[in-house]
Amino acid sequence: MSDREISKSGVTRRGALAGGIATAAAASLPAAIPALAQGTGPIRIGSTLALTGPLAQTGILHKIVGDIFIDQANKSGGLLGRKVEWVLLDDQSKPDVTRTLYERLLTVDKVDLLIGPYATGSILSAMGVAQRYNKILVHHTFGIPSLAKYDMHIPAWPIGFNPEKTVTNRVMDMLGNKVKTVAVVTSKFPSVHFLTVGARPVFKERGIQEVLFLEFEFGAKDFGPIAARVKDANPDLLFMGAIGLEGNQLLEALEKLNWTPRNHFYTYPTPGPLALSPMGKDALSFTAYEDLPPLNKAPGAAEFGKLFTDAAKAANNPYPFVETQTAASYSAWQILFHAAKETNSLDDRKMADFLKKNGAPTIIGKVRFDGPNNYGEDMMRIKQVQNQKWVIVYPDEFKTPGSQLIIK
Amino acid sequence: MGAQTARLRRDWSPYAIAIAFIGFALLPAFKPPAFVESFLYLLFFWIALATSWAIFSGFTGYVSFGHGAFYGAGVYTLANVASHYSFWWGLIAAGLVSATLGVAIAAIVFRTRLRGELFALLTLALAIVLATIILNTPVDGGPGLYLIGVSLPNFYGSPASTLYLLIMCVGMMSLATAWFVQQSKLGRGLFAISDDEDVAEILGVPTYAYKLIACGISSALAGIAGGIHAVFVNYVTVSGTFNLEVPLFVLLMSVLGGARSWIGPAIGAVFITLLNNLFVSGDYALLIRIGIGLTLVLTTLYMPEGIVGLFHTSWRRKALPLTGSQTPSGHADAPLAASIAPARQYQPTGETLVRLEDISLAFKGVRALDGVNMEVRKGEILGLVGPNGSGKSTLINVMSGFYKPDGGRIFLSGENITALSGHLVARNGIARTFQIPRPFGRMSVLDNVIVAAMFGSEQLPERAARERAMHYLGFVGLDTRAHALPSDLNLHQRKFLELARALASGAKLVMLDEVLAGLTPSEITSAIAMVRRIHSADTTIVFVEHNMRAVMELTHRLVVINQGKVIAEGDPRKVMQDAAVVAAYLGTSDAED
C-alpha cells in the first residue's frame, strides 16, 4: 500500500468516524466523543475545499495540488520525522459549512495543523475558527487583503496589501505613456470588484482619462450592451474586472461588433479559454507564477509542474498547467512545512512568528509576511497571451525567454 | 366518541418543545466540542428557515421562492444596522424589515389573486430584484460586507456558544410558532385556504388578512435567522446570500418532512442537514453529493406527504377504525331516518331576510344577471329554478359574496351587504353548498365542519365549534365518519358534509345549490327529508334545483330565472303553470302570450 493510499484510507475511516461522532453529538451525547491519538502517529493537517458546488472547478485543482504535495512529502520522509495525513472535507462551496467543518477538524478530528480552504468567503470563515483556537492558517488565494485581520493568518498568494494600487501601477508602468484613455468594466464578484474599483483612483492619479465605467452582475450572460458601450468609448486600454469566462464573453460580444480592443487586461480569467480564443490575442492579466522559465527554475517547481500536468490531464482538466492559483496552493503547503521544519515544532504561535519574521521560500519566490495584515510585497507579474499561450512579459527579470510585450 | 376526542386533543407537543429548549439551552454548560455547537447551529438554522417557510407556504399551499429574499433582507439589515448600532438593534431591525417586506409583497401580490406557478415565479423574481437593489446601492454595492465590528452578546463565555444559543432560540421559536399557528384559528384558516381558498372565503375565513399575517410571521422569522447567520458567516455577499440554496432547500426539507405539519419541516431539515454535513469526506465528494441527491429524490417520490404523512396515515389506520356506514355505497341516512321530524309548517311573516335590487353581472360582455329583483322571506324555503345557464348559480355566487355585482344592491336584514367580501357575508349569516361538493380535501370530515363553525356567523371558539360540528355531523348522519377524509365518502355523504358545514356556520340563510344532483332516488328521498329537517330548525333556505318533484314538495315560493332575468315568482304550482316558465323550459316562443 502506498503512502498516498494510506492517506486516503485514513481520511475515509476518520470521515466515517467523525460522521458517527457527529450523529452522537446531535443526540446530545458529547461525552461519547473519543479523543484521537496525538503526537506519535502521523501529523494530521486539516482543511476543507470546495469540491462540490459552484466553486468546485477550482477547488478540485487545489485538491490535486494537495495530493501531490502530501505524496511528495511522505516520500521524502514526511514532516519532523512523521508521516503526514491530509484530512480533507468538502465544504460544498459554502462559507457556513466551512466554518462548521473547521471546528470539526479541530475539535473532533483533532488535526495538528490547518491549511486554508478555497475562495475568499470560505477563507474568512476558516480564519474566524483559526482565530478562536489560536491556530496558524496558511491559505492560498485570498482576494481582499484588508479583510484579513487575524495575526496568525499567512497568505501564500503574494498579492501585497494594496493590490488594487500596486497591480494597477505595475500594469500602467509596463504600458507606459501609450495609454491615454481607459474603459473600466467590472463584475460585481466581491474580490474582482474590489480590485477593479480600487484601480480607478490610480488611473486618475496617473492622468489617464476614464472614458467608461461599467459594472455588471456576476453571472451576467448578455454582454452585447456592454460591448457596444466599450466600442463607442474606444479606449486605449480595456481594464476588465473579470472572473472565469466573463472576459471571453465580452470579447465574443465585441467580435460581433467587429471591434477588437487595442490593449486589454483581465483580473481573474480562466486561463485556458482566454488564451485559446482568437479574440484573446494580446490579452493581459496578472499572475504569481506560470510554468515557464525563469519561474519554473525554482527548486521543486519543474517536478511539481510535471506531476500537476499529469494529474490534471488524468482528471480531464482543460488547462493542465501550473499557474497562479495552483502555484499559490502549492506554495501554501511549502510555507506551512517550512515553518514547521524551521521551528522544529507544530506550535502555531512559533510557526506564525517565524514566518512573519523570516518569510518562506516557495516556487513563486520568497514570500514575506511582514507588512500590514501579514502581507508582504506584491509579487505579481504581468502575463500576456501570445500565440495562444500565456507568457510573462513584465517585469523584465521574470519575462519568458523570447517573449516581448505587445502594446498597440 | 368523547374519549376518542379527548385522546385526540391531548397534545404533548408544547411540553416537548419546552423540554427540548431547556435541554439544548443547557448543552453549552457541558462544554461539548465546538463542532457540536457549530453543527447544531446549522441544524437549527435550517429548522428555523424550513419551519418559517412552512408557516406560510406549507400551511397555505402557496409555494414561495421568496424565502431567500426575506432571509437575505435579514442578513443585510443586520449587517448594516449592527455595524452602526448594536447586534440586538440589528436583529430587531432584521425581523422588522423582513416582516414588512413580506407583508408588503403579499399585500400587493394577493390583490392580484395570483396563485400556483405564477405566484411561485413572482416570488422568485422578488429575490432577484432585491439582490439587484442591494448590489447596486450602498447597502452592499458589490464588494460584500465584513462584520468584524459587530460585537455579540456573551453567553457561556464563547462566541460559538452564543451563536448556537441565538439560532437555537430562533429555531425553537419557529417550532413553537408553527405549533401554535397550526392549533389556532389562524392555522385552521390557513389549511382551509390551502385546500380551497374560494370555499374558505365564503365559509368566513378572512383569506386575504390571514395570508398577510402568515407571510409576516414567516418572513420575520426568516429575517431573524438571516440576521444571526450574517454574524455566523462574518462576511456577506450578494451572490452568497441570494442564491437558490435557501428557497430550494427549505422547499425540499418541508416536502420531505411534511409541509402541512408544524414538525414536518424540522424533520426534513434535520434529515437533509445530517446528510449534507456528516458525509463530507474529501474523497469521492462528488459521488457522495450524487448519492445524497438520489436519496432525496427517491424519498420525496415515495413519500409525497412527507415523513409526517407516513405517521399520520398509520395513526389514522390504527386509531380510527372505520365504523358505521363505511362501505363505499353506505348511506348516512340511518341515524337520520330514526330522527326525522315532521316538516315545520311555514307561517308567513312577510319579513324580508334578503332583498336583491336590480342585480346585474356580466362576464366579458355576456350578461349573466340582468336586473334581478328578488326577495327571500324569513323562514321560507324559496325555490330558485331555471334552465341550465339561466344564472341561478351566478346569483348564488353573488349573494354569497363570491362575485361582486356590476350593479344593484343586496340587503340582508335591511343592511346593505353588496360591497362585503365573501367572508364578511358569511359572518353576517349567509351560507351555501356547492353543486359539486367542495370539501377541504386534506381535512377530516370533522375539521371541515369545525372550520365552518369557527368562522361562520357565530365565530365559535374551538371547543364549542367542535361540539357544534359533532352535533351537525350527527344531524346529517356522518358522526361515525368524523375522522375520515372527504375522499373516503361517497357523493351522497359529501353532499351531506356540505350541509353540515353550512348549518354549523350558524347561518340565517342557507343556499342549497343542486343538492340533489347525481343522487339515486332513495338518496333523493333522504335528502328531501334532510332539507325539511333543516327548515324545521328555523333556517331560511334558498333551494336551487332541477328536480321538480323535490321543488314542488319542498318550496313555499318559487322564483324562476332565465337568461339572467326573473321571469316569474310566487306560489310554486301557479308559477309552474306560467306560460313564460313553460316556454323557458320547453324552449318554445312565448310570443303568443
Image (cartoon, coloured by chain):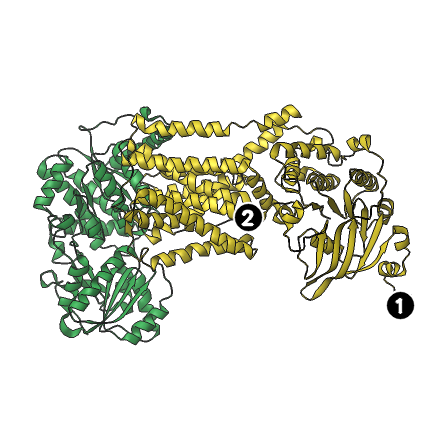
Chain colours: A green, B yellow
Going by the numbered disc 2, the residue's amino acid type is: Ala
Q: Are marks 1 and 2 on the same chain?
A: yes
Asked if residue A359 is positioned above or below residue B308 in the image, the reply reads: below
Q: Chain of mark 1?
A: B
**Residue at the disc numbered 1:** B591
Q: Residues within 10 Å of mark 2 (few under 14, many from 20)?
A: some
For marks 1 and 2 on the same chain, the one whose residue lies earlier in the sequence: 2
Q: Position of residue B58 (x, y in %)?
A: 52, 43
Judge left or right: residue A36 versus residue B298.
left
Q: Which of these two is toward me, A188 or B562?
A: B562
Q: Residues within 10 Å of mark 1 (few under 14, many from 20)?
A: few
Going by the numbered disc 1, the residue's amino acid type is: Ala
Judge left or right: residue B378 versus residue B29.
right
Q: Residue at x 47, y 44 (%)?
A: B217
Q: Which of these two is toward me, B396 or B584?
A: B396
Query: Is any atom of residue B439 visible in this view?
Result: yes
Q: Quadrant of the image for the N terminus of chain A? A: top left
Q: Which mark is residue B209?
A: 2
